[in-house]
Image (cartoon, grey):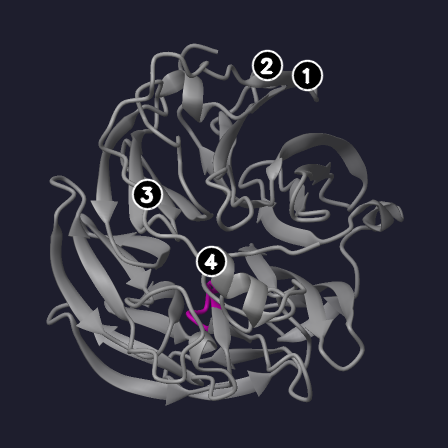
Amino acid sequence: MLHFNRSHIDDSNTISIMKTHMKLSLKPLLTLLVCAISFSACRKTETPIIDPTVTPVAPGEKGPVKGFFLLNEANMGSNKASLDYYDAESGKYFKNIFPSRNPNVVKELGDVGNDIKIYGNKLYAVINVSNLVMVMDVNTAKQIGTISIPNCRYITFDKGNAYVSSYAGPVKIDPNARLGYIAKIDTASLAVKDTCVVGYQPEEMVIRDNKLYVANSGGYRVPNYDNTVSVIDLNTFKETKKITVGINLHRLRLDSDNNIYVSSRGDYKTVASNLYILNPADKITNVLNIAASNMTISGDSLYVYSTEWSHITNTNTITYAIVNTKTKAVVSRSFIKDGTDKKITIPYGIAIHPETKEIFVTDARDYVTPGRLYCFTPDGILKWDVETGDIPAHIVFTRKRLSGI
């Protein structure tokens, strides 16, 4: 089946409107590209309001972390991005909470949910193909406002500002695709204050020593991928340099020693996905030679999975690993220890509970029907699993319990 996913286009999930693992050709993709969705009108009164599906999945527990939000991307062009919520106190999973809390928002969240973060009392969902950031009250999940940013990708925060990466141009493969940019947003007013041009099709960002690091993919310019990390001085909001790393960059993670882990998706043919370490002096010190689709850091451990598509074999290779961030060595080739990784068709998201250290992995399955979320103990034993929205991808933990549940 075809999975159309926002910003990369290729046969796996990202030659660059896709992500790292989908199978499609350019011809059907170009016929299904969609324009930005307007969120200003009201929902028609005859349209029924969808109540969330509630599923008990675990014994309730109290603690500083009250639960988490999960953003489901959904297939590009379907306008089915959705928001789920897990409530730790009751142990219940609430699927698709946004419509009932925002009955006057047309098309609900919109087309392709690409990132979700919490800053202060606001919950920010980056909706890629709808060209906007949806801003909600973290206590209620009710919309506060929207921020219009074309082909937006990821979001991070620092000192009262949000930074959003943007591909800038339309969603399509184009050898002449323009450079992307980073938008600087005032989190009080939700106004775009400034923009800074970076590399081609910028992706994730991290902040280190008052500098913003941006992974440039160049996915729309296939086969001429970008291979740089842009560095922006946050005092001047100007790009100061580009660091050459590897082609088709995507993920960035910062460890406790100020090293940045940078993932490369390769070219899906002869250049494999890889993982690089950028030290505090902005030098590449290690090439780990492991594939990386997504990753997260907990303590001194980097949890990595890969769903690596090959145009040569027309198959995915799925791997899991743990890297010790102190030694830079791979210490485990699977963080799922009970064999239940075989239940997961397409791993698509990963998160570690900040208190319990439970491991969460999402499964996109076939990309067009509901996905699944798996919760594992810190030792890698399956605790519970639950149905999600389509293409579950991004988790953010909250210390404020959602009201009205």
| Residue visible at 79% across and 65% down in the picture | 333
The 10 Å Cα crowd at callout 3, few under 14, some 14 to 19, many 20 or more, is some
- Could you say whether the residue bearing mark 4 is in a helix, strand or loop? loop
| Labelled disc at residue 56 | 1
Residue 369: % across, % down: 67, 39
Q: Nearer the viewer, residue 300 or 115?
A: 115
Q: Reply above or below: 164 against 328.
A: above
Q: Mark 3 or mark 4, which has the lower sequence index?
A: 4
Q: In the displayed structure, does residue 317 sit left or right of residue 202?
A: right
Find disc 4 in the rendering and name its residue: 6
36 horizontally vs 396: left or right: left
Report the residue that reaches farthest toward the right.
Answer: 339
Alpha carbon distance from label 2 to label 1: 8 Å
State the separation of the CA atoms marked 3 and 1.
34 Å
Residue underneath mark 2? 90
| Residue 149 shown in magenta | no
Q: Which mark is residue 37?
A: 3
User: Which-is-in-front pick, marks 3 and 4?
Assistant: 3
- Badge 1 density bin: few <14, some 14–19, many ≥20, Cα 10 Å: some
Q: Which residues are magenta?
A: 251-259
At label 4, the amino acid type is: Arg
Asked whether the residues under the numbered discs 3 and 1 touch, taking CB atoms below 8 Å apart as contact, a structural biologist would say no
Q: Nearer the viewer, residue 187 or 358?
A: 187
* Other residues around mark 2 within 10 Å, as few (<14) / some (14–19) / many (≥20): some
For the image, the number of numbered tags is 4
What amino acid is at disc 3? Ile
Residue at 37% x, 84% y: name it.
282
Going from N to C along the chain, the mark reached first, 4 or 2, is 4
